[in-house]
Amino acid sequence: MTNDELTRAQGERRRYSLAGAGTLLIEGFTGRRATAEARGRSWRFGRSGFWQRAIEATDATGAVVGVFEPRILRGGGSLRWGGRELQLRPVSAWRSRFALADGGLELALLEGKGWGKRPVKVTSADDDLDPGLLLFAAFVVRALAEDATAAASGASA
């Protein structure tokens, strides 16, 4: 079992590192897109669709390799990566904490806090988990945490 955090690289405001997996370089003013790099491969992550709810991952050739489609109710959603059908299931009603699951098997637990020095905490049960998948899941959980924060701020106004 591995415990890591997506951590801001020293001296860089937009680059984050996940030990053992790779890096995310956040793009744009709102941070809704990123470039991920791990083990000599790279991907681009960003929202897609008319309402910008789905999040896609494309490889260096532009082919879609991953898609997250959120559920409207109860949070979480389906996550496809390289032909695998996975789920991001909420595991807390009070925090942005999700289990990355393959059927009944939990592969990782991710807790998002929006952006900052340490925006996502990752506990992986599988040390051989695809680094691209782990970076994509971390990006998605961070986006879900940010959306929850924005919704809570709007509700209190």
Image (cartoon, rainbow, N blue to C red):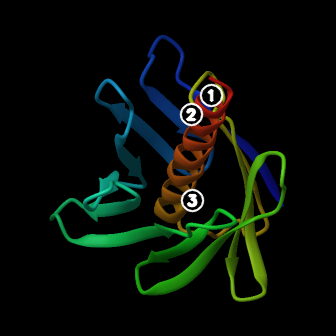
Rendering coords of residue 30 (x, y %): 37, 29
Type of amino acid at the residue the image marks with label 3: Leu
Residue 86 left/right relative to 40: right
Instruction: Write the residue at 42% across / 86% down.
Output: 83
Q: Nearer the viewer, mark 2 or mark 3?
A: 2
Q: Which residue is mark 1?
A: 153
Instruction: Tell me which corner region of the image, top left, top right, bottom left or bottom right, holds residue 14.
Output: top left
- In the picture of the structure, the residue carrying the numbered disc 2 is 150
In the image, is residue 61 above or below residue 82? Answer: above
Q: Looking at numbered disc 2 in the image, what kind of residue is underneath it?
A: Ala
CB-based contact (under 8 Å), mark 2 and mark 1: yes
Task: From the image, tell me which residue sits under label 3.
Answer: 134
**Residue in view at x 77 percent, y 75 percent:** 106
C-alpha span from label 2 to label 1: 5 Å
Q: Judge by depth and name the residue closer to the eye, 67 or 7.
A: 67
- The CA span between labels 1 and 3 is 29 Å
- Type of amino acid at the residue the image marks with label 1: Ser
Q: Secondary structure at mark 2?
A: helix
